[in-house]
């Protein structure tokens, strides 16, 4: 998988490629929900990755929305695994986005396309 746009959280991979996303709370209680591809909102338990496969047709999109809430000051690290060209973590085949604490929940929308 490769990153298309770091700021816009956009990725592209092969048909059927597995995607793994982890969300780690730092200094706050883990309070995360997600919605994958328009499905129901689900609670993401701590230390549990989100895993799914990309669709099969070229250009197909799988959206992932993460909502992170905070119990106080802290942050979340969102890591997308097996990304070959991420400028923030090129040696580890992953791409990390960090989100600092806020009075309001933080919403992150990620987009995964098929090549």
Image (tube, rainbow, N blue to C red):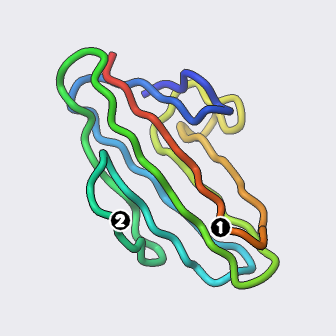
Residue at the extreme right: 73
Q: Could you classify mark 1 by the number of other residues whose Cα lies within 10 Å: few (under 14), some (14-19), or many (20 or more)?
A: some
Give the residue number, with chain letter if any, for mark 1: 105
User: In which quadrant will I find the C terminus?
Assistant: top left
Find residue 41 and name its label: 2
Q: Name the quadrant containing residue 82.
A: top left
- Residue lying at 65% horizontally and 67% vertically, measured from the top left: 105
- Residue lying at 50% horizontally and 57% vertically, measured from the top left: 66
Image position of 33 (left or right of 41): right
Find residue 40 and name its label: none
Q: Earlier in the sequence, mark 1 or mark 2?
A: 2
- Residue lying at 30% horizontally and 48% vertically, measured from the top left: 38
Q: Is residue 43 above or below residue 71?
A: above
Along the viewing direction, whichever of 70 and 46 lies nearer the viewer: 70
Q: Is residue 59 above or below residue 51?
A: above
Along the viewing direction, whichever of 75 and 70 lies nearer the viewer: 70
Q: Name the quadrant containing residue 69.
A: bottom right
Q: How many marks?
A: 2
**Distance in Å between CA atoms under marks 1 and 2:** 15 Å
SS at badge 2: loop
- Residue lying at 45% horizontally and 52% vertically, measured from the top left: 21
SS at badge 1: loop
User: In which quadrant will I find the N terminus?
Assistant: top left
Q: Could you classify mark 2 by the number of other residues whose Cα lies within 10 Å: few (under 14), some (14-19), or many (20 or more)?
A: few
Image position of 31 (left or right of 71): left
Q: Is residue 41 above or below residue 29?
A: above
Residue 40's spot in the image, x, y percent? 28, 62
Residue 72's spot in the image, x, y percent? 77, 82
Image position of 83 (left or right of 24): left
């Amino acid at each position: 998988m490769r990153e298309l746009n770091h700021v816009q959280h956009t990725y592209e991979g092969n048909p059927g490629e597995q995607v793994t996303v982890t969300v780690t709370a730092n200094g706050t209680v883990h309070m995360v929900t997600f919605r994958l591809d328009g499905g129901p909102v689900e609670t993401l338990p701590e230390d549990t990755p989100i895993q799914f496969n990309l669709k099969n047709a070229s250009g197909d999109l799988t959206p992932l929305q993460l909502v992170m809430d905070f119990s106080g000051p802290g942050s979340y690290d969102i890591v997308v695994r097996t990304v070959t060209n991420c400028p923030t973590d090129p040696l580890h085949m992953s791409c990390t986005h960090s989100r600092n604490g806020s009075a309001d929940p933080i919403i992150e929308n990620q987009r995964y396309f098929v090549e």
